[in-house]
Image (cartoon, coloured by chain):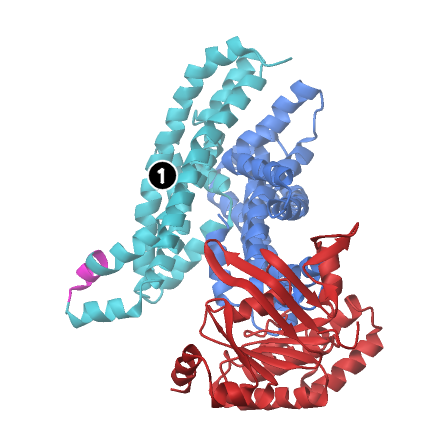
Amino acid sequence: MQPSEPMIVFEGVEKRFGDHVVLSDLDMTVAPGEHVTLIGPSGSGKTTILRLLMCLEKVDAGTIRVGGRYLTHMEKNGGLVPADERYSREVRKRIGMVFQQFNLFPNMTVRRNLTEAPTRVLGLSKDEANARAEELLDLVGLGDKIDAHPTQLSGGQQQRVAIARALAMRPDVLLLDEVTSALDPELVAGVLSLLQDIGKSTDITILCVTHEMGFAQDFSHRVMMFDGGRIIEDAPPEELFGAPRHERTRTFLQAVSG
Amino acid sequence: MENLPRIVAVLLDGVPETVIAAAGGILLTILLAFSAGLALLSEHRLLRAISRTYVEFFRGTSEVVQLFWIYFVLPVLVGIQLLPLFAGVVVLGLNHGAYGAEIVRGAVSSVPKAQVEGAKALSFSPRDIRWRVVMPQAVLEMLPSFNNLFIQLLKSTAILSFIVVSEVTERGVQVLVPNFGDDIVLIFVLMLLIYLVLAVLITAVMRWLERIGARRLGRRPSASARTAAVAAAH
Amino acid sequence: MGWDWNYAIAILPEMLGALRVTIEITLLGSLVALVLGLVIAVVRRARIPVVDQLLWAFVEFVRSTPLLVQVFFLFFVLPRFGIVLGAFAVGVIALGVHYATYTSEVYRAGIDAVPRGQWEAAAALSLPQSRVWTGVILPQAVPRVLPALGNYVISMFKEVPLLLGIGVVEVVNKAKELSSETFRPIEPYTIAGLLFLALSLPASILVRRLERRRAAV
């Protein structure tokens, strides 16, 4: 990867579900270490961007590159062909994701949730993976829960474990998909301040979809306003929240701030 | 009542055959249920079609017909005469395996899609996703339904008396009823009790497996899973 | 020995006659199972001490033991108490009672699924108990369990051949008779299998469609 190369590049990306166009001709770049927050009304395509990066959905047109390598396509005989499962998985290893509903594995303890992928996918030894898991659980404040089952934890604790699980893969890119939306109100602040700490102490590139505008303002280097599958405004948070240029952005911000 | 020891002895004489038929049938059922159930979820159309045909065929015809067909028709067609007990195990397994395939299919597809996505986000291989994330959760869901299915299978072993396997029903009806006509109520009560005890044993083993499984998931077996299973078993 | 079309066609009328017997037993047995099962479910709902425990034990016992043994039991034991019935009637009763224990559980699930508020609303209107059941609860509970009940009727149809043990000439017993007369087992047993398939396959497709319609509502 060249030093000047962006971490994430979307070029002419289109995504449809049946007749419904979710993303149309989308271009977007994110620099290494940048924190970008995607905001906008539901159904505007924010979450689809994260799901495309995680290969949970396939693009209908256009290309996505991550760290200089194509994610959606692979080079073959000088041309580009759609990526196969194995290739995508290889590129995707550098990306981690935290979900709205945590998606912890109920059949595994917290420890195994954190060590299973590092050992199976990255080939870490058991000791290395365990050490990494313990360190991360301490970081998220749940060092004493390592042998608990996910069902024995509160929503906030489960989400902290899910964050630790994503970090255990040492990703270059972290995707946060409405990570506080399923939490009880009193648990939201703790998870958000944990994310602030992680943002400050690492150089991970972070893409975040959230409805927490205060968090978006403090956390992001750049905010993108989505509507109807397009980016209608792309600016540093102080500008976008302080002096939105677009009428649609203004009405949206008014609506969410109540 | 003075015939009680004789009656008990004759009935107990049939227990090994009943147990072998049930245990053999259960093993074959598990094997077929998982093979056919996973084949029903396969991406290969041919595999799905073969499995669907097997399931519909064995669920659509009567178990007694299947037994008689394998025992009386197969020898004429291909010249292989199966031993009665063996023919019984094969039919019990084939028949209940078809029902079990639907249990496996249902349980695997009931594992939330979010679990698969969570695993994909960690770059697990499709193989690891199936065997380390989906199957452990699905198997726990299957246990109550398999409990019901195995009890159905145990009850079905009685039809082996039609092809003269000396199991409990055959002992009772062919040997005891003609000889101890005065004790007929006693004979039947004892027969039914033997089946009841075996059914309770099956349930005890399955509940034990459920408890182990639930502990691994850090929760109690859900009541909803059990009631759903009652409806699904048939 | 291969398949003989002439023989197959020659025995078909007799096989169809036996199928008719099988269907008659299924329908009468279903009637017993559907009515008796409902009675058990409604009585158990009242939670009368002792009666409730006895019914529970009866249901569990019947469900956990082989239908075939129960058939023999009724066939041999009823005459001892002066009740002399033909094999056909014994078959209908045995199948009906056995399946009533299943349908009672199905009805129970359906009744439990009726929201509490419906009972309370009916009570608030001071409806008599019988009217609460027939006018409010059952009209909501029964439609949603129809697919499950349908599945049991199909299962019962496939279990009618057990009655060959007491000499009822249903499909499989007819096949057995024919094959021992002519020493040709292939055609009778294969036709028997196909007859079951021909009826139960469309029936279960129908039930599945009903299930989907219910799920969609």
Q: Quadrant of the C terminus of chain A?
A: bottom left
**Magenta span: chief secondary structure:** helix
- Pointer 1: residues within 10 angstroms few (<14), some, or many (20+)? many
User: In the rendered picture, chain C carries what hue?
Assistant: cyan
Residue B177 position, x and y percent, is: 52, 36
Q: Residue at x 56, y 33 (%)?
A: B174
Residue A100 position, x and y percent, is: 55, 75
Looking at this view, is B123 or B164 the one in front?
A: B123
Magenta stretch: includes residue C99: no
- The answer to whether any part of residue C190 appears in the image is yes
User: What residue did someone put label 1 on?
Assistant: C29
Res C116 quadrant in image: bottom left
Looking at this view, is C176 or A71 the one in front?
A: A71
Magenta-colored span: C127-134
**Tag 1 secondary structure:** helix
User: In the rendered picture, chain B carries what hue?
Assistant: blue
Relative placement, left or right, of A51 versus C152 is right
Chain coloured red in this rendering: A
Relative placement, left or right, of C38 versus A184 is left
Residue type beneath disc 1:
Gly
Check the image and name the residue furthest to the front. A245
Q: Residue at x 58, y 28 (%)?
A: B68
Looking at this view, is C169 or A226 the one in front?
A: A226
Looking at this view, is B26 or A45 the one in front?
A: A45
